[in-house]
Amino acid sequence: MTTQKKYKIGTRGSPLALAQAHETRERLLTAHPDLLSEDDLQIVVIKTTGDQIQDRALSEAGGKGLFVKEIEEALIRGDIDLAVHSMKDMETSLPNGLVIDCILPREDPRDAFISKDGTALADMPAGSVIGTSSLRRQAQILNVRPDLKVCLFRGSVETRLRKLEEGQADATLLACAGLNRLDNAQVITHPLESSEMLPAVAQGAIGIEHRADDEEMGRLLAAINHPESCIRVQCERAMLAELDGSCRTPIAGHAVLKENQTIELEATLFSPDGVQRFDARGEASLEDAVALGTRLGRELREKAGDDFPAFQIP
């Protein structure tokens, strides 16, 4: 017996966003075979401001929230019932009345280095051009390779790979998670370990947003929440929130669960030019995961000082 209600899943329209929406849909169908049929879950594509702006970095256009604003507005209006997001695109605070309490199993959080001729990052010739729209990636590249140049690369995964093929840059970086979800991991020259490039907060994690007062949707989503991924994301986002982090500030963080039922968080704050770098690392019980993130965020802010350029937003 299926439910009589039809649910609308809001998503961006890129191939990666659609892949994530379809994964969410399939997980819900698998978790609730007696309640949901394929006809009960409709995917609705919503074009966001972030998708429309391609000629400048998000840090100049208004931040990563541009990728979710229209979707969240549709959710608040009731035009959709749930929204599927890449968690690394989410601001640390949500609009009143919306919650994200469902995180799907996290994919590979690492960054993928992709060069035209298969050359590794460490071996790129001086003066090589690396295409990226991420201040975090830019700062980490320039921190270890100040002899390289960084140019703006915006667009979907497919667009960035096309730009690389056209010679607009010598190399680029994408998330391993996205390439895996698109069955396109073969383009990766090499994945960058966290010791080489610390990932973006929540990179590789899909979050499902819904209205806080929609208890029925909350129950449906609870069945597909992955607790381990959820606690890692909460820890990392707590650190980011303490730093008022957005795409305007080069911040990286990665939490892992240890065998002794603790969580370890590594976090780094950079200046946009990569010259300055501040690191923090800590471990705590799973119950204190959010407190750990908050503590390391405060530690980074104290190390950098309130006059740190990345905190000075025009």
Image (spheres, helix red, strand yellow):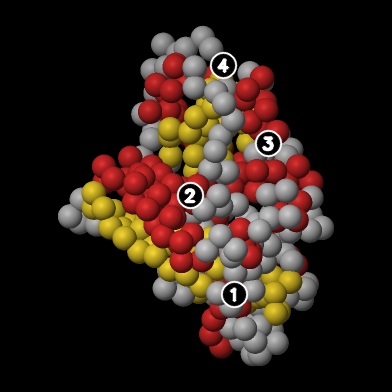
Quarter of image, res 94? top right
- Badge count: 4
Amino acid residing under circle 1: Gly
3 or 1: mark nearer the eye: 1
Which quadrant is home to the C terminus? Answer: bottom right
Q: Relative to 306, does residue 224 appear above or below in the rendering?
A: above
Check disc 3: other Cα within 10 Å, few if <14, some if 14-19, many if 20+. Answer: some
Coordinates of residue 132 in the picture (x, y in percent): 67, 66
- Report the residue marked by disc 2: 242
* Label 3 – label 2 distance at C-alpha: 22 Å
Q: SS for tag 2?
A: helix
Which tag, 1 or 2, sits closer to the chain's start? 2
> Is there a contact, CB below 8 Å, between mark 2 and mark 4?
no
Coordinates of residue 8 in the picture (x, y in percent): 60, 23
Q: Depth check: 203 or 160 in front?
A: 203
Q: Depth check: 168 or 78 in front?
A: 78
Which quadrant is home to the N terminus? Answer: top left
Give the label on residue 274, or none: 1
Whether residue 229 appears in this view of the structure is no
Q: SS for tag 4?
A: loop
Q: SS for tag 3?
A: helix
